[in-house]
Amino acid sequence: MKTSNIHGYCAIGVFNAKTDHNIGTLWRSAYILGASYIFTVGKRYKKQSSDVTRTWARIPYFHYDSLEDLCENIPYDCHLIAVELTEDAEFLHDFEHPKRAIYLLGSEDQGLPDTVLAKCRKVIKLPGNSSLNVAVTGSIVMYDRAAKLNLELPPNHR
């Protein structure tokens, strides 16, 4: 059996998450839309009823104590991409997803601090003048990646 991964891989995580329920929803979307793993930075994830697929049992879940811990464990040649509503961020609809990407979202009330943004290779944003919750934002980013890379997910990945 020959295997290939022509589209690369991605992961998605949240920095100092505020609402556990939204993280569970994000994890479910990430799994369905092809994420290779999920993670948290700062605050740990607790199992949630909103994660009906039990994502943590299907793809790896990692916890990093700090941004430095995350950065020390990024896979080789993988881009750290911030998702944040900043003036100079690139709009998602114009963004070309790298083959290997880690998407990092901030908490719903604080976002990503400048110190975190400075460590990211790119910063992307969704249109609008106000932020969406972390589950909706992350789900849209994951869908955009799947659509632009024309990913066909296997039936058992639903």
Image (cartoon, rainbow, N blue to C red):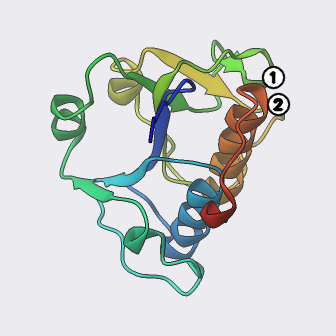
User: Residue 142 sits in which quadrant?
Assistant: top right
Look at mark 2 in the image and give the residue it sits on: 127
Of the numbered discs 2 and 1, the one sitting upstream in the chain is: 1
Secondary structure of the residue carrying numbered label 2: loop
Look at mark 1 in the image and give the residue it sits on: 93
- Residue at 20% in and 44% down: 66
Q: Depth check: give the residue in front, 77 or 135.
A: 77
Asked if residue 18 lies left or right of residue 137, the reply is: left
Provide residue 82's location: percent of width, then percent of height.
Answer: 50, 29
Asked if residue 129 lies left or right of residue 63, the reply is: right
Circle 2: residue type = Pro
- Residue at 68% in and 33% down: 145
Provide residue 39's location: percent of width, then percent of height.
Answer: 36, 53
Circle 1: residue type = His
User: Residue 17 sits in which quadrant?
Assistant: bottom left
Image vertical order of residue 20 relative to residue 42, above or below: below
